[in-house]
Amino acid sequence: MTARRMATVAAAALLCTAYGSSQTTINSIQRPTPGKVLNSNLAGWKADKSDTQFAAQAMEVNMAERELGKLAMQKGSDRVKPIARMMVQDHGEMNRQMQPIAEKIGVAPPAQLSSADQALLASLQNKSGKQFDSAYLQAVLVENRADLTAYNNEERIGKDLTLKNLAAIDSHLAVIHLRAIERIAQPVPAASPPGHGAPAVQPH
């Protein structure tokens, strides 16, 4: 077995370990605790602006990461495709969990990607081979750093207990995603990809 082949197998094994952890988490994503009063279920409860903004942003990001993942499953190398598959499956499930909560506070799913994410997707569509792999891995690394910031902020300042509960689970998933990506990606600066204004964050 060549050294290159051994490295590929080792990377796949590490990713499978991380991916298995993320699947266990997403499949057991926390439901409202029996007997616990959830703000969005209270009569007359009015959602806080921070909660509605978080829900809208989270659904758009989940949709974007699914679209990026689908593209990477088509154009990426075998090294990248496991990451792409994880993004498609996990962010799809994250949105399925988010949407009914968002509806209760009057937030509809986004009709389309943000202009920044549309630009990012278009940029990736024009790349191929190693250039595509590198650009995709950098994009999802930056995206997931920004995700972690948003989830941590909702946990800290959000008012709706249901959303805070979901943000805690999703922040754990973002850490799992980051670790999986970092295992196969070259180090990249904590900066936004072209056309994207997401902030960087240091996981805590």
Image: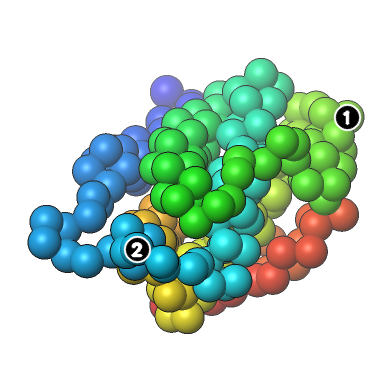
Mark 2, Cα crowd under 10 Å, few <14 / some 14-19 / many 20+, is: few
What residue is drawn where x is 88% and y is 29%?
Answer: 126
Relative image position of residue 160 (x, y in whole percent): 40, 68
Relative image position of residue 149 (x, y in whole percent): 55, 70
What residue is drawn where x is 46% and y is 74%?
Answer: 158
Query: Viewer-proximal residue, 133 or 120?
Result: 120
Q: Residue type at mark 2: give it.
A: Ala
Residue at the outermost bottom position: 157
Quarter of image, res 49: bottom right
Query: Viewer-proximal residue, 37 or 190?
Result: 37
Relative image position of residue 33 (x, y in whole percent): 16, 58
What residue is drawn where x is 76% and y is 27%?
Answer: 129
Mark 1, Cα crowd under 10 Å, few <14 / some 14-19 / many 20+, is: few
Relative image position of residue 28 (x, y in whole percent): 22, 43
Residue to which mark 1 is pinned: 126
What residue is drawn where x is 45% and y is 31%?
Answer: 89
Residue to which mark 2 is pinned: 43
Residue at the outermost left position: 35
Q: On the rendered image, what quadrant is the C terminus found in?
A: bottom left
Left or right of residue 190: residue 147: left
Q: On the rendered image, what quadrant is the N terminus found in?
A: top left
Q: Residue type at mark 1: give it.
A: Asn
Residue at the outermost front position: 44
Quarter of image, res 69: top right
Q: Is residue 136 above or below residue 176?
A: above
